[in-house]
């Protein structure tokens, strides 16, 4: 499968615990995005990387959230001291941006987080 | 800030009926427009996109959308729906900063139920 991969598919954690999710983008894509989707809502932008540089962060991304893409390939999203309001589907997407266009904006299947 | 409005929360149609899902966005500059579909239990899939050129865009599975710049609209249409079109449909916009693209901003989605 050469699409966007996310791991794990599901995560149940107790409030206050830390969790980390991983995203493997399509290999030739230089951009990687994180979104969050709650029930009845469209995906909401969290942050994105161009290669290894984190270029934009949403104000939704509180200081408990941190994302990395250390080698410009896979990315991790960590949530510290989880709260029940963090329960959501976390989506990763990747794309190739070149001069004049953006190509292949592809989403992964997501990681569903449940905080109990 | 940019925003996307999808007028219908839930649409119920019989097979062979025609479909039109509304999408309006708020941004005065150059945008790219997308429609994504999410089938039950599956990830977001791109139906079609508009970057420039012919404002009538044809996508996969018989869907099309028309960009009307004066109305800030990008409505999705299909002349004859099938039971397999039952899914949630999301309109999305990103800002074109003259060769560089912003992140996607999604509407809240429209759930389509097609009765056999």
Image (cartoon, coloured by chain):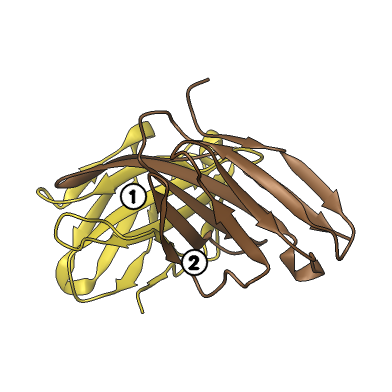
Chain colours: A brown, B yellow
- On what subunit does the disc labeled 2 rest? B
> Residue A66: which quarter of the image?
bottom right
Q: Look at the image and tell me whether residue B80 can be seen.
A: no
Residue drawn at x 80%, y 69% is A83
For the residue labelled by badge 1, is the local secondary structure a helix, a strand or a loop? strand
> Residue B26: which quarter of the image?
bottom left
* Marks 2 and 1 share the same chain: yes
Position of residue A9 measured from the top left corner of the image (x, y, whole percent):
71, 38
**Residue A12 or A24: which is nearer the viewer?**
A24
Above or below A58: residue B53? above
Position of residue B101 measured from the top left corner of the image (x, y, whole percent):
26, 56
Callout 2: few (<14), some (14-19), or many (20+) C-alpha neighbours within 10 Å? some
Q: Look at the image and tell me whether residue B91 can be seen.
A: yes
- On what subunit does the disc labeled 1 rest? B
Q: Earlier in the sequence, mark 2 or mark 1?
A: 2
Rounded to the nearest whole Å, what is the CA distance between mark 2 and mark 1?
Answer: 14 Å
Position of residue B34 measured from the top left corner of the image (x, y, whole percent):
33, 52
Q: Check the picture and name the quadrant holding the C terminus of chain A.
A: bottom right
> Residue B81: which quarter of the image?
top left
Residue drawn at x 33%, y 69% is B24
Please name the residue that numbered disc 2 is placed on.
Answer: B8
Residue drawn at x 37%, y 59% is B103
**Residue B3 or A5: which is nearer the viewer?**
A5
Please name the residue that numbered disc 1 is placed on.
Answer: B77
């Amino acid at each position: 499968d050469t699409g966007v991969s996310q791991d794990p598919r599901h995560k149940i954690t107790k409030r206050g615990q830390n969790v980390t999710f991983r995203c493997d983008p399509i290999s030739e894509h230089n951009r990687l995005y994180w979104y969050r989707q709650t029930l009845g809502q469209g995906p909401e932008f969290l942050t994105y990387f161009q290669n290894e540089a984190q270029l934009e962060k949403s104000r939704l991304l509180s200081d408990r959230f941190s994302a990395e893409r250390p080698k410009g390939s896979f990315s991790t999203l960590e949530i510290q001291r989880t709260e029940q309001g963090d329960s959501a589907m976390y989506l990763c997407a990747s794309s190739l941006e070149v001069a004049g266009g953006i190509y292949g904006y592809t989403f992964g299947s997501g990681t569903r987080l449940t905080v109990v | 800030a940019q925003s996307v409005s999808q007028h219908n929360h839930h649409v119920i149609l019989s097979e062979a009926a025609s479909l039109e899902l509304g999408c309006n966005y708020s941004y005065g500059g150059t945008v790219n427009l997308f429609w994504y579909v999410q089938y039950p239990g599956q990830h977001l899939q791109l139906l079609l996109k508009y970057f420039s050129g012919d404002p009538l865009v044809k996508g996969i599975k018989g869907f099309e959308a028309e960009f009307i710049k004066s109305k800030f609209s990008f409505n999705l249409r299909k002349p004859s729906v099938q039971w397999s079109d039952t899914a949630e449909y999301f309109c999305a916009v990103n800002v074109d900063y003259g060769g560089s693209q912003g992140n996607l901003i999604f509407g809240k989605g429209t759930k389509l139920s097609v009765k056999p």
